Image (spheres, rainbow, N blue to C red):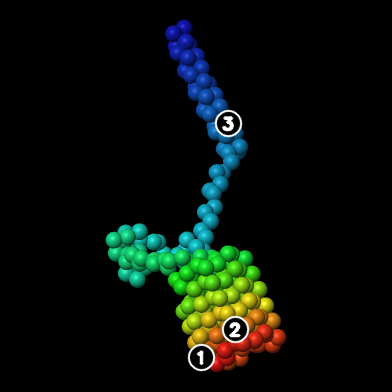
Amino acid sequence: MYHQQRQNLLFTLSAILTGTTLLAGVGIYVVLKGVETPVAVPKQIVSTQDITEAPVDTLTPPPEDTLVSSPEDTQVVTIQTQRNELGKNLGGVNWQGKDLRTMKLRNANLGGANLANTDLSGVDLSGSTLSGANLANANLSGVNLRSANLGGAILNNANLRNANLSHADFRGARLDNANLKGAILKGTLLEGVNLNNTIMP
C-alpha cells in the first residue's frame, strides 16, 4: 500500500515538473518572439553608369591608328643650327668692322647699333629695326631691307648697290656719298634724308 502511494506521488511530481518546464519554455519563446527585430536588408543602389557602360576588355589591343610607335620606329630629325644664330634683340651692339654675311637678322632689333665698316652684303634684314644705327662705310650690296626701319640712321659712304629698299623707312637718315645704284626704292620713305653726292638708281 505504501509502495503504491509512493509511485503515485512520484508520477504526479514528474507530471507537474514536465508541465512546468513546458510552460516555462513556451513563455520564453513567446517573449523572445515578441522582441525580435527583423533584420533590414541593405538597399543596393545600381547607378546608371553600371547599366549603360559595357565592361572594358583589357586584353583587346587598341586600334592600329591609336598605337604609339616605339622609339625604334620614330624617325629622328636633326635640327641644324645656322652659324652665328643670335637672338632678335641686338640693340646697341658694337660690331664695327665685322664680317656679318652669315648672320640671320630678319626682324632683328639693331636700333642704335654700331655697324660701321661692316660687311652685310646679301644679308636678309627685312623687317628689322636699324633706327639710329651707324652704318657708315658699310657694305650693304644686295642686302634685303624691305620694310626695315632706318629712321635717323647714318649711312654715309655706304654701299647699297642692288639692295632691296622697298617700303623701308629712311626718314631723317644720312646717305651722303652713298651708292644706291640698282637699288629698289618702291614705296621707300625718304622724307628729310640727306642725299648729298648720293648715287641714286
Q: Nearer the viewer, mark 2 or mark 3?
A: 2
Q: Residue at x 50, y 63 (%)?
A: 49
Q: Secondary structure at mark 1?
A: loop
Q: Secondary structure at mark 3?
A: helix
Q: Nearer the viewer, mark 1 or mark 3?
A: 1
Q: Secondary structure at mark 2?
A: loop
Spatial CA span between label 1 and label 3: 127 Å
Q: Which mark is residue 14?
A: none
38 above or below 196?
Answer: above
Residue 120 in percent (x, y) is at 50, 75
Q: Amino acid at mark 3?
A: Gly
Q: Amino acid at mark 2?
A: Asn
Q: Nearer the viewer, residue 107 or 144?
A: 144
Quadrant of image for the N terminus:
top left
Q: Which mark is residue 177?
A: 2
Q: Nearer the viewer, residue 77 or 162?
A: 162
**Does residue 146 appear in the picture of this structure?**
no
Q: Residue at x 60, y 34 (%)?
A: 31
Q: Which mark is residue 182?
A: 1
